[in-house]
Image (cartoon, helix red, strand yellow):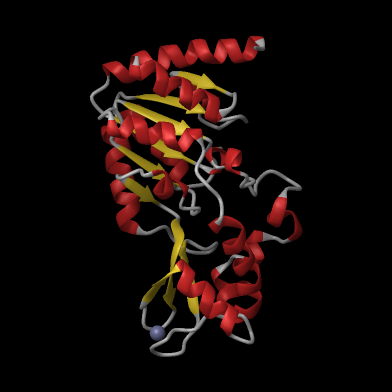
Amino acid sequence: MTERATASLREIERLAQLVRDARSVVALTGAGISVPSGIPDFRTPQTGLWARVDPMEVAHIDAFASDPARFWSFYGERFATLRSKQPNGAHRALVEMERAGTLQAVITQNVDMLHRKAGTRELIEVHGSIASCSCSRCARSVELERARAALAAEPDGVPRCEHCGAAMRPDVVLFGELLPADALRRAGELCAGAEVLLCIGSSLEVHPVAGLPLLTARAGGAVAILTEGPTPLDELAAVRVHGDVEVELRALARALAS
Ligand code: ZN
């Protein structure tokens, strides 16, 4: 084991103690938790789908409105990539902690459904999820697999509403859109009330989610940051580890179970 990994595990031991002493523990997860499941972080240059396209351009609400066929040629590929991915040990460690009564909720920036697939019950998906699509006119919604079938059946690749024929859209927050107010409010309440906030695999750069740890810190709670790269909030972290999130969360769940 490298020196850094050993140091990380010592920090995890310290984090386990903070978690044991806390009455409320909440997790906030970002793209980094899904990397071990084979989903590259699109902010990492030159990996996967996002290396070939500018997400700000194709996954933008204006792109959906002006050229739904182009939008869906991109999003259809994204669906195909994401739907087969499976949760990893980090997602499962959070489920274990929830079932043991240690973890109150998971707030995630990810749309990949992996927390759902792992079995997290109290889940706030602040950027929505690919689990469903909605009609852009009448708002009727269908599940992912039905939307994929509709997409495959249409000559232009745009899934259309069975009721009114308008283009469907994925139930994710697109670039250029605001986050759902209810989810954001609930996330804010959870973070303000958390005695420990575990920030996992998030670069904490995308607002308004990046402001959530500040709510915990201002209310006197401890912020733990488990993310590979630097974050703008590193200075306020009570615990800071940079290693493999899957190894670290499994170590945390193990320490808490013993
Ligand atoms: Zn409709």
Q: Count how many numbered circles sit on residues in the image.
A: 0
Residue 80 in the image: state x and y as whole percent. 60, 63
Q: Is residue 58 left or right of residue 131?
A: right
Residue 190 in the image: state x and y as whole percent. 29, 39
| Residue 202 vs residue 215, the one in the foreground | 202
Q: Residue at x 36, y 36 (%)?
A: 95
Residue 67 visible in rendering: no
Quadrant of the drawing holding the N terminus: top right
* Residue at far bottom of view: 164
Quadrant of the drawing holding the C terminus: top left
Could you say which quadrant of the image residue 19 lies in?
Answer: top left
Could you say which quadrant of the image residue 194 lies in?
Answer: top left
Q: Residue at x 42, y 12 (%)?
A: 14
Residue 132 visible in rendering: yes
Q: Is residue 167 left or right of residue 212?
A: right
User: Is residue 219 positioned above or below 147 on the image?
Assistant: above
Residue 218 in the image: state x and y as whole percent. 33, 29
User: Is residue 85 positioned above or below 226 on the image?
Assistant: below
User: Quick check: which quadrant has ligand 1?
Assistant: bottom left
| Residue 181 vs residue 199, the one in the foreground | 199
Q: Is residue 121 left or right of residue 73?
A: left
